[in-house]
Image (cartoon, rainbow, N blue to C red):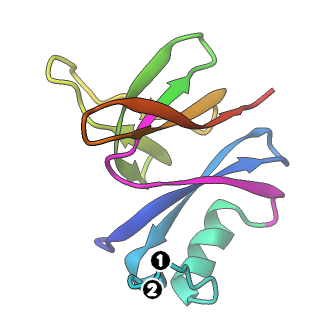
């Protein structure tokens, strides 16, 4: 729809025992202080469409460039930088690696999320870990 977004809010959906993603459009955000206007009609529209009446718990806001690690149900572990929230497929795509055919994706059915803080020298430290049991 061409609307720029500030971040993607990641929730644990207690009703469905999975992750849920909510894109936060720039128009719903005060860019000076970073506060999200939850009364904005577009925020309410996205929330109703993607979360509705489900019981959710906010985990983290992911911004493009954040480094994450995702553990899949199959046991495969992917790690990379957040690139974009894909509204069509309801996934968070990571930056495509040079030799890869397609980008890795963080799906709502994945089992574990680790978010890293990376300093200017490239040193990574775990900021958050969330696992679905």
Percent x, y for residue 1? 33, 71
| Residue occupied by mark 2 | 30
| Residue occupied by mark 1 | 34
Percent x, y for residue 109? 64, 32
- Mark 2 in CB contact with mark 1 (< 8 angstroms): yes
Percent x, y for residue 43? 56, 78
Instruction: Check the picture and name the quadrant holding the C terminus.
Output: top right
- Residue toward you, 69 or 94: 69
Q: Mark yes or no: residue 110 visible.
A: no
Distance from Cα at disc 2 to Cα at disc 1? 5 Å
Q: Mark yes or no: residue 8 visible.
A: yes
Query: Is residue 119 in the magenta section?
Result: no
Please tell me which residue is depicted at 79% across the width and 38% down the height of the picture.
17
Q: Is residue 38 above or below residue 99?
A: below
Q: Is residue 21 above or below residue 67?
A: below
Residue 69 shown left or right of residue 52 in the figure: left
Please tell me which residue is depicted at 39% across the width and 82% down the height of the picture.
31
Question: Dot 2: what SS?
Answer: loop
Q: Quadrant of residue 63?
A: bottom left
Q: Is residue 9 above or below residue 17?
A: below
Please tell me which residue is depicted at 48% across the width and 83% down the height of the picture.
28
Percent x, y for residue 128? 61, 39
Counting labels gives 2
Q: Residues within 10 Å of mark 1 (few under 14, many from 20)?
A: few
Query: Is residue 54 in the magenta section?
Result: yes
Question: Dot 1: what SS?
Answer: loop
Q: Quadrant of residue 98?
A: top left
For this orientation, the residue located farthest to the left is 98
- First to last magenta residue range: 53-68
Residue 103 shown left or right of residue 108 in the figure: left
């Amino acid at each position: 729809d061409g609307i720029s977004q500030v971040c993607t809010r990641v929730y644990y959906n207690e009703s469905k025992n999975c992750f849920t993603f909510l894109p936060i459009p720039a128009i719903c955000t005060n860019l000076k202080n970073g506060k999200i206007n939850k009364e904005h009609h577009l925020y309410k529209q996205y929330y109703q469409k993607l979360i509705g009446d489900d019981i959710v718990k906010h985990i983290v806001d992911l911004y493009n460039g954040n480094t994450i690690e995702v553990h899949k149900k199959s046991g495969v572990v992917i790690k990379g930088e957040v690139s974009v929230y894909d509204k069509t497929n309801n996934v968070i795509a990571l930056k495509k690696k040079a030799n890869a055919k397609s980008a890795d994706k963080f799906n709502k059915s994945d089992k574990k999320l680790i978010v890293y803080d990376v300093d200017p020298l490239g040193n990574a430290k775990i900021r958050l870990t969330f696992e679905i049991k």
